[in-house]
Amino acid sequence: MTTLDERHGDGAGGRDVPGGEAVLALAGARDTAAVPLDDPGAALPGLTGSKAANLARAARAGLPVLPGFVIPHGGGGDTVALRRAWDDLSDGGTLPLVVRSSSPREDTEGSSLAGRFASVLDVRGWSAFRAAVGTVLDSARLPDGSTAPMAVLVQPMLGARAGGVMFGADPVAGRSDRMLVSAVHGGPDSLVGGERTGTGYWLSARGRLLRTEQAEQPEQAEQPEHPEESPLEEGPPLTRSELARLVRLARRARKVFGGPQDIEFGFDTDGRLWLFQSRPITAMAARPARGARLLGPGPVAETLPAQLTPLEEDLWVTPMAHGLAAALDIGGTAPRRLLRTVPVVRTVGGRAAADLRLLGAARPRHPWLALLNPAPGARRLAAAWRVGRLGTALPGLATDLVADVDRRLAGVPAPAATPSPALVAELRWTRRVLVSLHAQEALAGALLPEPPTSRTAAGAALTALAAARARGVPDAQVIAAEPVVLALTAPSLRGGARVPDAQVPGQGGAGGGSAHGASDQAPQRTDQAPQRISSPVPGLPPREALRLRIRWVQELQVRLAREAARRTGLDVERLALLRWTEVAAALEGGPLPADAHTRVPPSASPALPDAFRLAEGEVVVAEHHDDHRDDSRGDGNGNRGLGASRGRAVGTAWDGTGPRPPDAVLVVRTLDPALAPLLPDLTGLVAQTGSPLSHLAVLAREFGLPAVVGAAHAVRRFPPGSRLSLDGTTGDVRAGEAP
């Protein structure tokens, strides 16, 4: 018979295996043709491979392991001894065997290599056994041309009534307090090989059954040629008592190996439980630390919906975070010490996300906690005094701030005619005034009552856009003629503001814009527009007036940054990769960073989940709705969101692309401001994120459009073309037509 040394070459005799010298010493002291699993040497991974060594350790600890032997790495040359071991295990060839790979490189803490090497089942007879051993040894050749050290594990073939895989932890959620089981009727091989889908069981650390997911059966299963060979499988593969025994096995294996294990198991026809394989779980998902903040894009995505560059973060996210922190401090919502150390808004992968708890966008897990205010009495009293005075003074403060911003914007000279120190001074002013604007805008939304028929900046922008187009003003010049239209756009250093390409009120037609309002043809850019950024917009309530000034100040920053790029010799795309301090230093006469011309733009990041927490390394871990659902706000099925605009509607779900149904209910993830032109012709609006105070929610109320925000998984639950009903008062959203 061919030995391992002959197949792997002279250098594969154990020298490249951990513990190789000890293995060779052991090999010289005993007959290594076949090492029984109950032999102490079988627990050496360098000799018998990780799979066999783990089973040997488990057997010595009293776990239910089938008997067997291992042809060690570099052994198998003594054919007489090997045949004697085969004869004893197979009872003279009458019992079938399983011949499996066992390499030191598989089933380790760093790599499982699951399914990479061969296993041969139902091996009968000496010739078939030798061929199966050869198949396993041949599978040790890796795609890169190298050969892995390989031992061969031999055990009896068990006719299992049920079998499967058990994880002593939840690798998907990264939770060590959960166990997962997937089981099928028969042995686990069809399950681990991907041929069949097992029944899933989710268990607590103490073995309590949390959830069961039945395996889906094909709609038209092929009938077997001989029905007696494929008995009908009825009912779940495992009973409650068998699940309890599996939990005990997982606990014992965890103690033996020092960590949660990936276990293959089987129950024989007599009901006995057997351990076929145990290896470390190597791919645990990232798990946020206890107390990690709950983040989400909803409250800020409508202002900053796109992925941002470093300079955009410094110009827009940092002032927003400081402004919202100031508003929370004035209102006494959070301790000042916390607000100084925890940013209210931050970026993750270049995308803006807010602290949902601090902003009140996420309710407590237990509703009764909302009745408790743990803030110290002195802080509560001071906050009440400030808020009481501020509620009266805020309209006047907002009017004064708006007037100051308008005067400053009207007096800004052309950036090309501004000296570099003055350019830096203007950019510093924009960052400071954005803090005040964001703070007052947040306070106005929280403290000032909204008039029943109030105007919005977006509504004024739609009216101005329609009037400009009616006059024949090209879209490239609309913003220069009507700066209020900027309320329909998001800021960007890397491209001009794009006028929404959808139909607007008064123009007729169904509109052909995308869900983001941007044209699929040539973008409507305003890079060459005159310098006028603001113009009076009478009749706006304080909050809407502040929102519009935020957008105007951001547009001024865009124009100043483009001039800064020209003076530093960088294009705008490369300037956007710098930080604000680096840009300011260069404009004041300092050198550019040494790597300014070689910095690489960050790769595109996916959209953030509606709610998530950060694990180590800023890994985004989505917060499943079932984990933080406020059951008092729904029926337990995720049908309840937050009512944002009163009214009831029944219509057809539409994602904003393709033909618009006559009774379209727009279903989106976030409330992008570019969606505003779509609202007048809609029947309803449903968003996964956002709040009743968000911009589009206010605009929906202005149009009398029923709207629901915070509807979990709405995009997935209501695909385009499906029928749904919504109640903008209660926040209820359901598939089909409600009574």
Image (cartoon, rainbow, N blue to C red):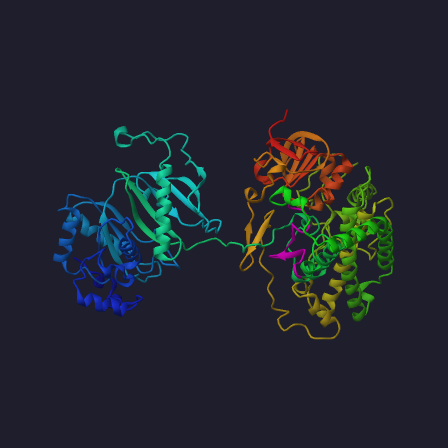
Q: Could you tell me residue 368's position as x and y percent?
A: 64, 42
On the image, the x and y values in percent for residue 101 come to: 28, 54
The quadrant holding residue 189 is top left
Q: Which residues are magenta?
A: 341-362
* Quadrant (top left/top right/bottom left/bottom right) for the C terminus: top right
In the image, residue 277 sits, relative to residue 635, either above or below, namely below
Q: Quadrant of the N terminus?
A: bottom left
Q: Does residue 633 sit above or below 608 in this rendering?
A: above
Q: Nearer the viewer, residue 467 or 257?
A: 257
Residue 505 position in % (x across, y down): 78, 37
Which residue corresponds to the image point at 48% horizontal and 50% vertical from the top-left?
Answer: 175
Residue 684 lies left or right of residue 158; in this view the side is right
Left or right: 702 in relation to 158: right
Q: How many marks?
A: 0
Q: Residue furthest bottom?
A: 590
Q: Nearer the viewer, residue 349 or 626?
A: 626
What residue do we see at 74% from left, 71% from top? 587
Residue situated furthest front in the rendering: 377
Please provide percent x and percent y for residue 554. 76, 56
Report which quarter residue 439 is drawn in.
bottom right
Q: Residue at x 54, y 60 (%)?
A: 617
Q: Would you say residue 114 is visible in this rendering?
A: no
Q: Does the stretch in magenta take in 625? A: no
Q: Does the magenta-highlighted stretch encompass residue 361?
A: yes
The reply to whether residue 455 is visible in this rendering is yes
